Image (tube, grey):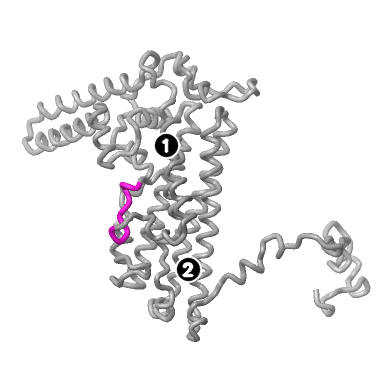
Amino acid sequence: FPPEDCCTMDSVPRSETSGEFGGCLAHQEGRNRLANGGLDYSDYLKLDQVLSAQVLQSDLHGDAAHDEHLFIVTHQAYELWFKQILWEIDSIRDVFNNVTLDEGKTLIILSRLNRVNQILKLLVDQVMILETMTPLDFADFRDYLSPASGFQSLQFRLLENKLGLKQEHRVRYNQKHYQEVFRTHPHYITMLEDSENEDSLVELVQRWLERTPGLEEAGFDFWGKFKVAVQGMLANQLHDAENEEDPAVKEDRMFHYKKQKGAFESIFDEEKHNALVAKGDRKFTHKALQGAMMISLYRDEPRFHQPYQLLNQLMDIDSLLTKWRYNHVTMVQRMLGSKVGTGGSSGYHYLRSTVSDRYKVFLDLFNLSTYLIPRDRIPPLTQSMHRKLSVFDRNNDSGISMEDLRDLSS
C-alpha cells in the first residue's frame, strides 16, 4: 500500500484490531521470499516474451491501426488454448493405449474431455470479442496481413488429425492438399504426417467400443437380440399400416414403415454399413457401432454409466467445434462479405463448406437416435449379464484390466 494508506495501531480503535480477522494489513506477519532471489511470476510465465509478441504490422508500415492489437491478442489466445487442448487429447489417447483401463482411469478421461469442452465453449464465445471490431476497423490493417491466414494454424490441423478427421473428408483448400500451405515449414509437414499416422482418438474409441461386454455371439449376443426386437417392432408397424382404413393415414404409415425398415437394414447389413463408411456417411466400424448402441440402450446399468458419459463428451467436442466454425463463418461474412481471404481462398464460401457433417468425427454417435427403440422393446438382460454390468468390486485394488472391463462375458 502507498504510505498514506498504511495505518498505525494508534489510528485504529482497539475493537478493530482484535478478533480473528481484526488488525491492519500493515501489521500482518510475513516475509518476501523473493528477497534472496528465485523464480518470480514474470519469469515463470515468460511474460517478457509473451507480452512483447504483439507486433502490429500496421505500425511497422507507419499506419498504426488500433484494433490490430485486439486481433493479434485474440488469435494468440486461440493458439494457447489449442496447445492446451492438444495436451489433453494426447494424454487421453495415452490412457486409451494403456494395457489397463480401471475405473479411476475412466474418470481421468471424463475429466479431461470435460476440460477440453470447457475450453471449446470459451473459444466459441471468444468470437464475440472479435465482433466488437467493425468491418471498417478490420479494413484499416487487413491488407498488411496477406498472405497470412487462419488456415495456416498448424495446431488446429493437428487437432483435427488427432481427433480423427481424414484427408478424404476435408474440403480442399484452393483445390490443393491441406498440407500445401505449410511447405515453407518442413518440420510442420513432419508433425502433420506423424499426426495422420498415429492412432487417432476416434480409432482408439472404436477399439474400446468393439470390446463392449454383451456383444459376443456366444454370450449375451446383444446385436442378435436387438435385431429380433426391431423386427417385431417393424412387423407391428406394417400390420397397423396394412389394416388402416383411412387411405391418407395408411399411406403415411406405410411411408414411415418403409423408411424405418430401410434405416435399420443399413445397420444390420454389414456390407451396406461398410458401403456408407466408404462414402463418408458413417465413420465407425460395424462392431463399434454395435457397442455404442448397447451402451446407449443400457446406460442405466452401473458399468455403463461412465461409458455413456464418455460418448456424450465426445459428441460435445464435435458440437462445439461445429459451433466455433459457424461463429467464425458468420463473423467472416460480416467482416468481409464475399471478398477473397488473405490466404487466397474464397473466404466465406470456403469456410461455409466446412460447417457440415463431413467434419464431425463422431458423427455415428449423433445418429444413434435414429435407431433407438421404445424401452419396452429393449431386450431384457439375462441374470448373468445383469450381474456382469453391476458395480465394480471395490475390494479389488489391483486395477481392472481392459478385458475385465469390456470382455465381461468370460
Q: Position of residue 84 (x, y in %)?
A: 55, 52
Q: Residue at x 19, y 32 (%)?
A: 262
- Image location of residue 218, percent across then percent down: 37, 13
Q: Distance between the Cα atoms at labels 2 and 1?
A: 36 Å
Please, what is the three-letter code of the amino acid marked with disc 2?
Answer: Ile
**Of residues 317 and 380, the one drawn nearer to the viewer in this rendering:** 317
Q: Is residue 229 left or right of residue 212?
A: left
Residue extending furthest right? 10
The residue carrying pointer 2 sits among few (fewer than 14), some (14 to 19) or many (20 or more) residues within 10 Å by Cα, namely few
Of 214 and 28, which appears nearest the observer? 214
Front disc: 2 or 1: 1
Residue 158 x, y percent position in the rendering: 46, 51
Horizontally, is 356 left or right of 397 in the view? left
Q: Are marks 2 and 1 in contact (CB under 8 Å)?
A: no
**Which label is found at residue 203?**
1
Name the foreground residue: 382 vs 192: 192
Label 2 vs 1, first from the N-terminus: 2
Q: Secondary structure at mark 1?
A: helix
At a point 54% along the width and 34% down the height, the residue shown is: 106
- Queried whether the magenta region covers residue 226, the answer comes back as no
Query: Does the magenta portion include 173?
Result: yes
* Position of residue 251 measured from the top left corner of the image (x, y, whole percent): 9, 36
What amino acid is at disc 1? Answer: Glu
Residue under the point 57% across and 24% down: 400
Q: Which residue is mark 2?
A: 129
Q: Look at the image and give the residue range highlighted in magenta.
A: 167-175
Report the disc number at residue 324.
none
| Prevalent SS, magenta region | loop
Above or below for 131 versus 139: above
Question: Under tag 2, what secondary structure?
Answer: helix
